[in-house]
Image (cartoon, helix red, strand yellow):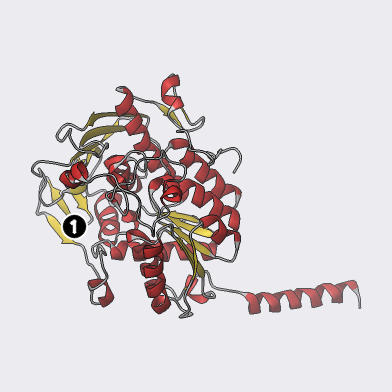
Amino acid sequence: MTRRDFIKTSSSAAAALAAVSYVPTTFAAEKFKRVGLIGTGWYGKADLWRLTQVAPVDIVSLCDVDSKLLNNCADTAMQKGKSGKRPRLYSDYRKMLAEKDLDVVLIATPDHWHSLQMIEACKSGADIYCQKPTGVDVSESQAMLAAARKHNRVVQIGTQRRSTPHLIEAKERFIDSGLLGKIQSVDICCYWHMRNRDTIATAPDTKPPEWLDYENWVGPAPMMPYNKIVHPRGWRAYMEYGNGIVGDMCVHMLDMVRWMMNLGWPTQITSWGGILNDKAARANISDTQTAQFDFNGLPVVWNHRAWGPNPEPDFPWAAIFHGEKGVLKASVFKYAFIPHDGKPVIKDQVMELDKYPEDKTEKDLETHVAPAIRGHMKNLLENVASRGKPVADIEQGHISSASCILANISAKLGRSLKFDPKTHQVVGDAEANTLLARPYRAPWTHPDPANV
């Protein structure tokens, strides 16, 4: 065979092989994804069942330190997973991830676990869907971003406003088009009563129930006496396990504003507030707080108040964009464009209950959020196939989450903070920098962004 014949034959064979092995970049054309879930409670199941609605996945593994939640989820997973088999069950996420046989890992544990579990999932070779915020401190969040990039993993954060159908429409129709004009300021808010403070104030400390491994539920966080409010779901009322209402609710609205307006890091963050109304409550998160995020002269101002009347009855959890040509109000339920000269445009969200009737009967499901979760899962899988960055890529989640954590630090210290994203340090404030990584309870070790 001559050199020319060899090249000609090799080229033809390569072309034939490429034609046979070509796989479209849509996730629907790929083999069933092998999926695992860490955290089988409220939002873990909401995320997992939405994933099964948009793609035929094999639910391989489930992990939780609460055996009741774990077994309940496993029973339903047999019906919703493609294989129909009962998933493998774990109480230790490290043992689950050590199998290294999962394509996608979902993480829906309390905030204080997100970083360690997400980093370990990156090392296992899985792509990831992780609930917000990205950790309980800035350094944790930075380490998550570093791990995703080092191990080349696709990571979607659960800031699903970026995948909410009517909000995508509002962004394109009024902001991207210029109909709103130059945006001069943005108000973001939550006026829902976020805590049942009477219950939190009176519930006594008790021994943990036998089905809960409380030692490993607490993990790297400070150990507190068990209280029935803490688990499940009530942990959000304690700064030991989360980031308060700012880390829970503000992160969604701040991230939505950043996405809609294509904003990066805020140049300065100022926050103040505290427990101003119910000082007897056991909860230690603020019931009243304001945070101003300055984006090079554009103020984005957050307010929450977990008591009293709602000043925006139709938009209790929302972003309000003030533009030269009008105002755009946007929430999970609807949007309203109110031009300075013209007729208002109002549109409610579509919950897709006709297409997904099972949403009507699913326990504790926020039906108004289900379409956004489905969209978020589709976007994740599309980028798993293409190896691209999803709409709520880990870097975007890091910016929004760290900004909210910095707001809490600002409120704690009583002064404004200027954060340098290149050095990941607060400029000229040594005390603030000591709060960027909080101590871990032994034997757990805080992740190092430089060594993940």
Query: Closer to the camera, 336 or 231?
Result: 231
Query: Closer to the camera, 271 or 323?
Result: 271
Name the amino acid, label 1. Lys
- Location of residue 85 with respect to 402 vertically, above or below: below
The quarter of the displayed image where residue 378 is located = bottom left
In the rendered image, which residue does mark 1 sit on? 334
Q: Is residue 104 shown left or right of residue 158?
A: right
Q: Is residue 106 shown left or right of residue 176?
A: right
Question: Which residue is drawn at the image coordinates 34% and 64% (left, top)?
Answer: 46
- Residue 373: x, y in percent? 34, 62
Q: Quadrant of the N terminus?
A: bottom right
Q: Quadrant of the C terminus?
A: top right
- Residue 317: x, y in percent? 20, 48
Query: Closer to the camera, 8 or 225?
Result: 225
At mark 1, the secondary structure is: strand
Dot 1 surroundings within 10 Å: few (below 14), some, or many (20 or more)?
some
Question: Which residue is drawn at the image coordinates 47% and 76% (left, top)?
Answer: 86
- Location of residue 448 with respect to 72 vertically, above or below: above
- Location of residue 349 with respect to 151 vertically, above or below: below
Question: Which residue is drawn at the image coordinates 15% and 36% (left, top)?
Answer: 278
Q: Is residue 183 shown left or right of residue 33?
A: left
The quarter of the displayed image where residue 39 is located = bottom left
